[in-house]
Amino acid sequence: MLINDFKKVYPNADYVVNLIPIYGAPYYGFESNQDMMDKYGETFMRHFEKPYISVDIYPFHTNEKDVDMQIVTNHKAIAETAKKYNAEKTFILQSSAGAEFEEDLCEGDMRWQVYAALAFGADNLCYYCYSVPKGREYNYCILNADNTPSKMYYFVKEINNEIQSFASAFLAYDWDKSIGVSGSVDQTFRVSPIE
């Protein structure tokens, strides 16, 4: 079994499997999103002393629509599965701009990703990518192509410092459910449970 082979080579390391976003479930042969989450949980979480779930969802693709619903649907599935197996949740957030992604990201885009993950009980946040990978045509990541800090570096630094100020209080609680709020400054807000 792959996990046993991994543990033979790296006995002190945690075995981590990064889950594909749920919109990939049919592409990879799963009957449904729930089928994928159930198989993932049974295979990679039920047997571990310290279960861990990780997913990367990059919402800012060129011409992407329904980004809010994709994030909510994915984060909810991760949170529910993690709760079932008492697993630690890591969300990998998009910090790359250009190429297949939107040409530019702003601080609000990063805040939206971070706080959406926190609303679904994130234990850890990671970013794709820290530096521009060779062969990728990204405009920037957290670092520019020349390895100098990009504007993303400063956005992420400020947001991470902000959330560290309340991290100990936040992490003292477990996720139970999330409530959605939608609207804009000139419209009435609607609040409803995320079903």
Image (tube, rainbow, N blue to C red):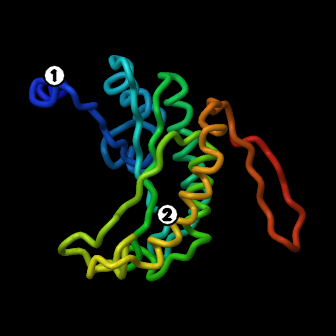
* Residue for badge 2: 59
Which of 33 and 77 lies nearest the eye of the viewer? Answer: 77
Q: Is residue 34 left or right of residue 144?
A: right
Q: Which mark is residue 4?
A: 1
Amino acid type, mark 2 = Pro
Q: Secondary structure at mark 2?
A: loop
Picture coordinates of residue 3, whole percent (x, y): 19, 26
Q: Secondary structure at mark 1?
A: helix
Picture coordinates of residue 53, whole percent (x, y): 41, 36
* Residue at 50% over, 38% down: 78
111 w.r.t. 179: above or below: below
16 w.r.t. 135: above or below: above
Q: Quadrant of residue 173?
A: top right
Which of 5 and 33 lies nearest the eye of the viewer? Answer: 5
Picture coordinates of residue 97, whole percent (x, y): 41, 76
Q: Are marks 1 and 2 in contact (CB under 8 Å)?
A: no
Q: Residues within 10 Å of mark 2 (few under 14, many from 20)?
A: some
Mark found first going from the N terminus, 1 or 2: 1
* Residue at 45% over, 77% down: 102
In the picture, the quarter occupied by the C terminus is top right
* Residue at 88% over, 69% down: 187
